[in-house]
C-alpha cells in the first residue's frame, strides 16, 4: 500500500502506539490512541494537526522523552531500522537519541543552557556519544556542523552565548547539534513556528537540503498544512489523539477525505484567492479526558449525522492506498466542488 513504507524500505515503523496521562484526581486519559504510521528511508512524513491533537506527545513518545508518570505508554510498538525502542534499556535508548534519532523543537532557546557558550554545548553533544574523541577533532566537528547549516563565522560563534544569537541562528544551531550524531531520522516538532516568515522559509530550505544531501528520513510535525507541501510526500492528519487521514500530500490537497483535513486546507491562504476572511474550523480540539463518544470531530463537523455521535469510525483503506477515519469520507470535498460548480 502506498501509504505504508514497509519491510526493507521502512526506517521508522510505529504500530498501534497509545499513550495516556494521569490527570488530577487520578483519572487516566488517552492522549495518543492506536497511532500507526511508517517513515521510509530518505522520506519525509508530515504529522499535521492543531495544538492539543497529540502530535507532539507522539513525537516525545518515540524519543521516550515523556515524563513517566504522569505519562504512561499503554501499548504499541516503535521500531527504528527494525529495532524495538519501547523496550530498550534506558542506557541504550540514550545512545539512540542523538545518534540514530534526533529531535529539533519549536523553541530553540529551551534546548540550550544560557550559561554555556554555543561551542561548549555543541562539543558536549559530540562527547555525549563518544568520550574518546580528541578536543581537536571535537572542535573540527563542531565548526563543520555549524558551517553545514549555514551559520556565518562559526569560529566566532563558538564563543557566543545563546542569548547573543537571533531566533533563526539558534534554530540553525539546534539543527547542527541534532545532526552531530549523523542520525538516521530527524524528528522536527514545529521547527519554524516561533520564527518570522522569512526565516521560516530559510529553515524549510535548509531542512530540504539536509534531507537531500544526507538521504535522511524526517518526521515533520506542524499545525501548518501550507508547509507540508514544501517538504513531505505523505501526510498523516491527527485529531484528538488519532490519525484521521493518511495520504499522499498530492491526494490530500486535491481531495481531502476527512472533513477535518478539508477544514485545515480551507484555512490556508492561497495566492490570488478572493476570500477576504479565511474560513476557520469552529470550536477547538476536545481536552484530555473530555473526548466525546463516537467520532471525536463530530461536535465541530457540519456533516455529522446521528451515527457519527454513536459509532467511532475506524481508520480504513478508502481506496488508492488512502486511509481515513470517517463514516462519510470525501463529503466535504464533494460539497465544495458542488458549490464551485454552482458558482461557476
Ligand atoms: Fe464528520 Fe461524521 Fe466524518 Fe466524524 S464521522 S468527521 S462527524 S462526517
Image (spheres, rainbow, N blue to C red):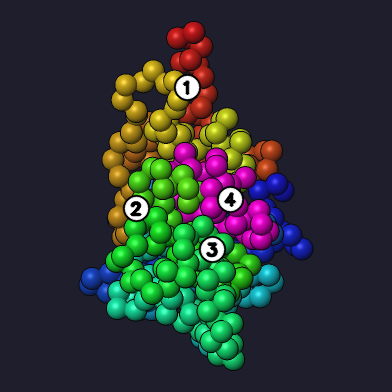
Q: Residues within 10 Å of mark 1 (few under 14, many from 20)?
A: some
Q: Residues within 10 Å of mark 3 (few under 14, many from 20)?
A: some
Residue at image coords 70%, 46%: 2
Which is in the foreground here, disc 4 or disc 3? 3
SS at mark 2 in the image = loop
Tell me whether circle 4 and circle 2 mark residues in contact (CB < 8 Å): no
Q: Position of residue 119 (x, y in %)?
A: 43, 76
**Residue 194 - label:** 2
Real-space Cα separation, disc 4 to disc 1, in angstroms: 32 Å
Real-space Cα separation, disc 4 to disc 2, in angstroms: 19 Å
Q: Earlier in the sequence, mark 4 or mark 1?
A: 4
Q: Earlier in the sequence, mark 1 or mark 3?
A: 3
Question: Taking 265 as reference, is 292 above or below it?
Answer: below
Residue at image coords 69%, 71%: 82
**Residue 60 - label:** none
Question: Taking 302 as reference, is 248 above or below it?
Answer: below
**Residue 147 - label:** 3
Farthest bottom residue in view = 132
Quadrant of the rendered structure where residue 197 is? Answer: top left
Q: Which residue is mark 1?
A: 336
Real-space Cα separation, disc 4 to disc 3, in angstroms: 16 Å
Report the side of 56 relative to 82 (left or right). Answer: left
Residue at image coords 39%, 33%: 267
Real-space Cα separation, disc 1 to disc 3, in angstroms: 47 Å
Q: Which residue is mark 4?
A: 208
Q: Which residues are magenta?
A: 205-233
Q: Position of residue 300 (x, y in %)?
A: 34, 38
Say if disc 2 is inside 8 Å of ligand 1: no
Amino acid at each position: 500500500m502506498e501509504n505504508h513504507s514497509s519491510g526493507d524500505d521502512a526506517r521508522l515503523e510505529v504500530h498501534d502506539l497509545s499513550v495516556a496521562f494521569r490527570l488530577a484526581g487520578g483519572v487516566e486519559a488517552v492522549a495518543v490512541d492506536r497511532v500507526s504510521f511508517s517513515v521510509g528511508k530518505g522520506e519525509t512524513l508530515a504529522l499535521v494537526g492543531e495544538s492539543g491533537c497529540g502530535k507532539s506527545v507522539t513525537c516525545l513518545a518515540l524519543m521516550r522523552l515523556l515524563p513517566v508518570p504522569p505519562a504512561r505508554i499503554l501499548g504499541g510498538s516503535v521500531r527504528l531500522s527494525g529495532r524495538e525502542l519501547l523496550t530498550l534499556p534506558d542506557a541504550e535508548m540514550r545512545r539512540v537519541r542523538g545518534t540514530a534519532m534526533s529531535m529539533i523543537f519549536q523553541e530553540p532557546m529551551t534546548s540550550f543552557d544560557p550559561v554555556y557558550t554555543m561551542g561548549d554545548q555543541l562539543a558536549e553533544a559530540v562527547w555525549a556519544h563518544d568520550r574518546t574523541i580528541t578536543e581537536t577533532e571535537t572542535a573540527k566537528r563542531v565548526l563543520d556542523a555549524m558551517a553545514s547549516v549555514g551559520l556565518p563565522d562559526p569560529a566566532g560563534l563558538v564563543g557566543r552565548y545563546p542569548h547573543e544569537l537571533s531566533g533563526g541562528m539558534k534554530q540553525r544551531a539546534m539543527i547542527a547539534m541534532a545532526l552531530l550524531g549523523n542520525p538516521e531520522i530527524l524528528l522536527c516538532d514545529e521547527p519554524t513556528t516561533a520564527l518570522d516568515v522569512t526565516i521560516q522559509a530559510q529553515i524549510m530550505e535548509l531542512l530540504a537540503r539536509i534531507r537531500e544531501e544526507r538521504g535522511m528520513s524526517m518526521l515533520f510535525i506542524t499545525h501548518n498544512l501550507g508547509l507540508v507541501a514544501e517538504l513531505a510526500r505523505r501526510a498523516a492528519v491527527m485529531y484528538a489523539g488519532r490519525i484521521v487521514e493518511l495520504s499522499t500530500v498530492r491526494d490530500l490537497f486535491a481531495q481531502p477525505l476527512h472533513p477535518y483535513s478539508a477544514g485545515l486546507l480551507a484555512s490556508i491562504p492561497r495566492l490570488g484567492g478572493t476570500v477576504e476572511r479565511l474560513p476557520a474550523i469552529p470550536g477547538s480540539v476536545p481536552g484530555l479526558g473530555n473526548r466525546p463518544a463516537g467520532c471525536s470531530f463530530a461536535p465541530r463537523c457540519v456533516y455529522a449525522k446521528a451515527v457519527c455521535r454513536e459509532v467511532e469510525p475506524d481508520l480504513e483503506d478508502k481506496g488508492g492506498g488512502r486511509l481515513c477515519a470517517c463514516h462519510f469520507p470525501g463529503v466535504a470535498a464533494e460539497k465544495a466542488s458542488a458549490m464551485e460548480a454552482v458558482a461557476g
